[in-house]
Image (tube, grey):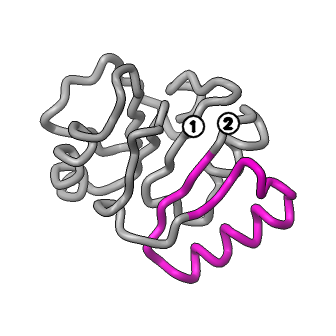
Amino acid sequence: MLRLGELKRGETVYDLGSGDGRIVLAAAQKFGARSIGVELDPALVTQSRQRIKDQKLDSLASIIEGDLFAQDYSQADLLTVYLLPITNAKLAPVLEKQLKRGARVVCHDFEFQEWNPEKTIVIEDA
C-alpha cells in the first residue's frame, strides 16, 4: 500500500484503522515518513505504541487512540485505508473537506464507492 501510494521520505502518512501498527512501522522504517495510525481498540493502540517504542521510531511514528471521524487529516500526503464499505462511505465527506490537493488515498479490498480510482491492482493470493 505504501509503495502503491508512492510514499516518499519526509511525507506524512495516516493509516486509518491501524490495527497492530504494521503499516505505521513500515512507513517510518522503510520510507522515513512521518506515520500516524488511528485506532479505536485500546489493546491494539497499546500494542502498536509498544512496538514503536521497541523499534525506537518515536520520532517518526505515533498512534492516535480515537474515532476516525474526529481527526484532522489536512497534513496527510497519503492515507492508507482498510475499512468496510459503510465506513468508507461515511468517511468520504470528511476526507473531501480535509485532504489537501495532491493527497493520495490507497484502499485495501474496499474502495470509496463515490470516487473513481486512478488505478486498481488485483493481487492474487499465493
Q: Mark 1 is on which residue type?
A: Thr
Mark 2 Cα within 10 Å, few/some/many (few <14, many 20+)? many
Find residue 111 and report its image quarter: top left
Would you say the residues marked 1 and 2 are in contact, meaning their CB atoms lie under 8 Å apart?
A: yes
Query: Horizontal placement of 2 versus 115: left or right?
Result: right
As drawn, the label of residue 123 is none
Q: Residue 77 at what x, y percent from top left?
A: 49, 31
Q: CA distance from mark 1 to mark 2?
A: 6 Å
As drawn, the label of residue 12 is 1
Q: Is residue 38 magenta?
A: yes
Mark 1 Cα within 10 Å, few/some/many (few <14, many 20+)? many
Q: Residue at x 40, y 51 (%)?
A: 82
Q: Is residue 53 magenta?
A: yes
Query: Horizontal placement of 79 versus 45: left or right?
Result: left
Find residue 104 and report its image quarter: top left
Residue placed furthest toward the bottom: 43
Residue on which the image places disc 2: 33
Comparing 12 with 31, the one in front is 12
Q: Which residues are magenta?
A: 35-63
Find residue 6 and report its image quarter: top right
Residue placed furthest toward the top: 118
Check the picture and name the quadrant holding the C terminus.
top right
Q: Mark 2 is on which residue type?
A: Ala
